[in-house]
Image (tube, rainbow, N blue to C red):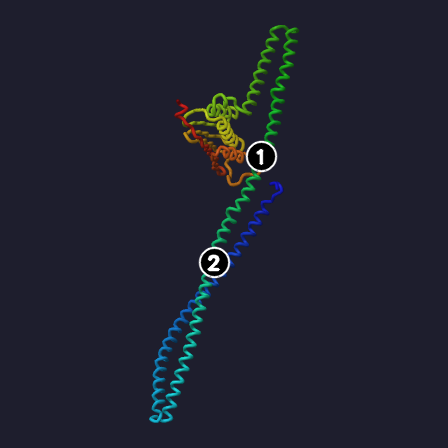
Amino acid sequence: MTFKTFDSKALDAILEKMVATVEESKHEIFEIGERCRQDYDALINELEEVKATVAKVIEQTDELETKSKFARRRLAEVSQHFRDFSEKQVREAYEKAHTIQIQLSMNRQRELQLRERRNELERRLCSLKDTIDRANHLVSQTTVVLNYLTSDLQSISEAIEDAKHKQEFGLRVIEAQEEERKRISREIHDGPAQMLANMLLRSDLVEKIYHENGMEEAIAEMRTLKELVRDSLKEVRRIIYDLRPMALDDLGLIPTLKKYLSTIENYKGSPVITYRHLGEERRLPTNYEIALFRLIQESVQNALKHAKATEIQVKSELRKNSFIATVKDNGTGFDVRSIREGAFGIVGMRERVSLLNGEISIHSKRGAGTLVIIQIPMQLDLEKEKR
């Protein structure tokens, strides 16, 4: 699967559907837990009532057992002295003992039923408690899943978009390289190549003038030819400097920046460019010098081309553990939250800084200029190099 055929919106739709499904499941689990909690509370109340009823029935049973003992004694006494009691007294003693015995049997049966109901309620409460605990655990687990879906997994889409931007950036770099080759080819063709062809014609003309008009006019023509050579050399040096300043290899970053910014100021004419360096002026590793020069060059060019700045302040500072560069202009500014399509300059700067494990921050508002801060970490053993 390539980034060209992959639809990141489809991934977003899938993630949204997954989030909605998990949200719905979480809600259903929560509802189940709430219903179980309501049933649990109702059973707790019922259990308390059953326990109170059991206690009351036990108390009644104890009273009935006491009465049953007295009734049995009375019945035994009446039975032993049957002739001393009337038929009515015998019947009353027998009926009272029988009634108390029935009531006692019914109370014992009710107590047994209440105890069984109590035990059943306690078992159901344990089961509901377990269900509630499991529901709470599932809710917490679905919450964790939702966090992953709404944060970590959604970053996949962002990562794919970032990869697509990087791929587009890579393609634009290739296109830019081709455009740069075309530009250099045109510059060489329209500049030094034309000048060299002109010099060749003028050299033939010098020889012709020398034979026809004498030495003085030939020398005058040679002076013109010399100016052409000087202009041609200047143009070639400008092209070479744009490709890669030779001073960067010979003198290092700081002197090259001074020369470059001075050249830009003189070449453009109108902008005022100030440069200040803090710390020691010393050579850095080649890859750092190239990267930092290009970053500052890109920031300055953006201020000149896009922001129409008339004043640019460039500052660099070399510390033991980092190199910090700032480029501030008074140009038109822009909204850093929205980079127009095709503007890969800032993307390229971020990529270059990322390769050096550095940080870049861009602060800008429309009509308020732009401030670019570049910080590149580096471990420099200054004491060792001083020795």
Residue 92 is situated, as x and y percent measured from the top left of the image, at: 38, 89
What crowding class fits label 1: few (fewer than 14 Cα within 10 Å), some (14-19), or many (20 or more)? some
Q: Which is in the foreground here, disc 1 or disc 2?
A: 2
Foreground of the two, 216 or 335 = 335
Amino acid bearing label 2: Arg
Residue depicted at 44% across the width and 29% down the height: 316
Q: Nearer the viewer, residue 114 or 281?
A: 114
Amino acid residing under circle 1: Gly
Residue visible at 37% across and 90% down in the picture: 90
Dot 1 falls on a residue whose secondary structure is helix
The 10 Å Cα crowd at callout 2, few under 14, some 14 to 19, many 20 or more, is some
| Quarter occupied by the C terminus | top left
Q: Where is residue 157 in the image (x, y as percent from the top left)?
A: 55, 44
Relative to 41, 182 lies left or right: right
Q: Please report the residue visible at 41 percent of the width from the left and 29 percent of the height from the top.
A: 320
Pointer 2 residue: 134
Q: How far apart are marks 1 and 2 (CA)?
A: 52 Å
Q: Looking at the image, is 132 positioned above or below residue 7?
A: below
Residue behind mark 1: 170
Indicate left or right for 215 with 52 as reference: right
Q: Which mark is residue 131?
A: none
Q: In this view, does 358 lie to the left or right of 212?
A: left
Residue 75 appears in which quarter of the rendering? bottom left
